Image (cartoon, coloured by chain):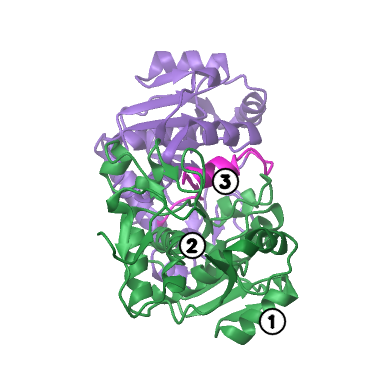
Chain colours: A green, B purple
Amino acid sequence: MHGQRVTINPLVSCGECPACKRGQENLCPHRQIISMPPREGAFADYVTMPERNLVAVPDDVALETAALAEPLAVSWHAVRLGMAALGDSPANRALVIGGGAIGVAAALALRAFGVHDVMVLEPNPLRLAYLRDRTDLAVGLPEAAGRDYDITVDAVGYDATRASASDATRPGGAIVHVGLGGGAAGLDIRRLTLQEITFIGTYTYTMQDFRDTCAAIFDGRLGPLDWIETRPLADGAAAFADIRAGRTAAPKIILKP
Amino acid sequence: MHGQRVTINPLVSCGECPACKRGQENLCPHRQIISMPPREGAFADYVTMPERNLVAVPDDVALETAALAEPLAVSWHAVRLGMAALGDSPANRALVIGGGAIGVAAALALRAFGVHDVMVLEPNPLRLAYLRDRTDLAVGLPEAAGRDYDITVDAVGYDATRASASDATRPGGAIVHVGLGGGAAGLDIRRLTLQEITFIGTYTYTMQDFRDTCAAIFDGRLGPLDWIETRPLADGAAAFADIRAGRTAAPKIILKP
């Protein structure tokens, strides 16, 4: 693929274990992710990756857009598992907790999977205003959650968001937990049991999810994907500081060399 | 069905709500269970039940055996949901936490669903010895749990058993939570997320599960079902006291008028 414009699946798996052989590369016990040891350095000028992890980007798709493939694939995978958990039971209404890149991407993936009544909750007023301005998603403060959702995606993963998800999901529904915020509490175990709510832990994506997500990016099924802010790579440290301090409006910042 | 020997599905649902219409009677918002208000009195000489809740018992099946249909159906349903959650991923090894009627029935249901490597954990030495003596199940103390199970059935539902289930289930596996012991802690949320373990709350059974369970009882797929103790109904209060005090060896006591 010499000289081609590509986007990179950063999850490298062994290809030989039972999980890899059944297409669940994200459960490979030897999985590695670019940016974490032993594959640090995703902001380097050059990185080495197995060729099977590269997806060619069509000429009419901007690299800034293609660079969103990773978070979009995380959410695509999470939504796919949630839809599978519902089986034949209806999936018409969904709640997404968190308006970061994973949450927004989950809302877009839900639409691509045919769920059109999607509500996104975001506590940061700066982010909320940005999402209202730049996307056509229904967004609101956490207090606006409502109830009786078929699927709830917790794209945050704190005790408080798990508690909200437990309350907002209908009997027989699914909570998809993709956040790693922290804590181990929040789930209403009694309600989950008495009302048969399934809690699905999800992490990254399979190789096929990544390719499916790229296809959906390229053919427009995930929308214009213009809810990003671009900054010079040299300002990267400040960008991370802004994210941690809640000073960034856009759900994703793209750093350009 | 006048004069017929029957076993009773004690879950009465409305038959008209969306959950009932899609065959998930156990999620009916109007569900009632015999023995709880407004249908108290399961030990009465006569009870009224909708005819659709009755299943005729073949002449060669003892009523003591047919009376096990309810707990067996709870476990059948739980195992069915757990198997469905695994999808195409393998289900060869299962762990059952708790050697009461629900736990033993889950182990038998797992076998009926084709999972033959099943381990049952039980802390009460009296119960453990009884199960070793009267069944061919692999049973052990909680310390013998082991790891890497495809499915774990938590038939107890306390913080400690959820913690054990979190630890014992393999990446991509399923925890089926059928116990209502109490508490809201124990789940290793971080492991469930990073290793994509699904936690399934389950409660009772659908009408079809109940009928399928009866069929499996009648044709012997759930084994001889002789792990019961029979006592006179007049001694019922003492039986409940013995159960609470951990003094009963058999997982189920049948009270006979």
Q: Amino acid at mark 2?
A: Pro
Count of number-bearing discs: 3
Disc 1 crowd, CA 10 A, few/some/many (<14, 14-19, 20+): some
Specify the quadrant that holds the N terminus of chain B. Answer: bottom left
What residue is rendered at 47% in x and 44% in y? B197
Question: To which chain does the residue with label 2 belong?
Answer: A
Give the CA distance from mark 3 to mark 2.
Answer: 60 Å
The residue range painted magenta reads B181-206
Q: Is residue A172 magenta?
A: no
Of mark 2 and mark 1, the one earlier in the sequence is 2
User: From the viewer's perspective, is residue A247 above or below residue B176?
Assistant: below
Rendered location of residue B112, percent (x, y): 29, 37
Disc 3 marks a residue whose amino acid type is Ala
Q: Is residue B205 magenta?
A: yes
Quarter assignment of residue A84: bottom left
Q: Are marks 2 and 1 in contact (CB under 8 Å)?
A: no
Give the main secondary structure of the magenta stretch. Answer: loop
Where residue B238 sits in the image (x, y, percent)? 65, 26
Look at mark 2 in the image and give the residue it sits on: A71
Kindly identify which chain the residue marked by label 3 belongs to: B
Say few, some or many: other residues with alpha carbon within 10 Å of mark 2 (under 14 / 14 to 19 / 20 or more). many
Q: Nearer the viewer, residue B45 or A110?
A: A110
Q: Which residue matches tag 3? A: B44
Q: Secondary structure at mark 2?
A: helix
Q: Are marks 3 and 2 in contact (CB under 8 Å)?
A: no
State whether discs 1 and 3 lie on one chain.
no
To the question of a shared chain for discs 3 and 2, the answer is no
Inter-mark Cα distance, 2 to 1: 21 Å
Label 3: which secondary element: loop
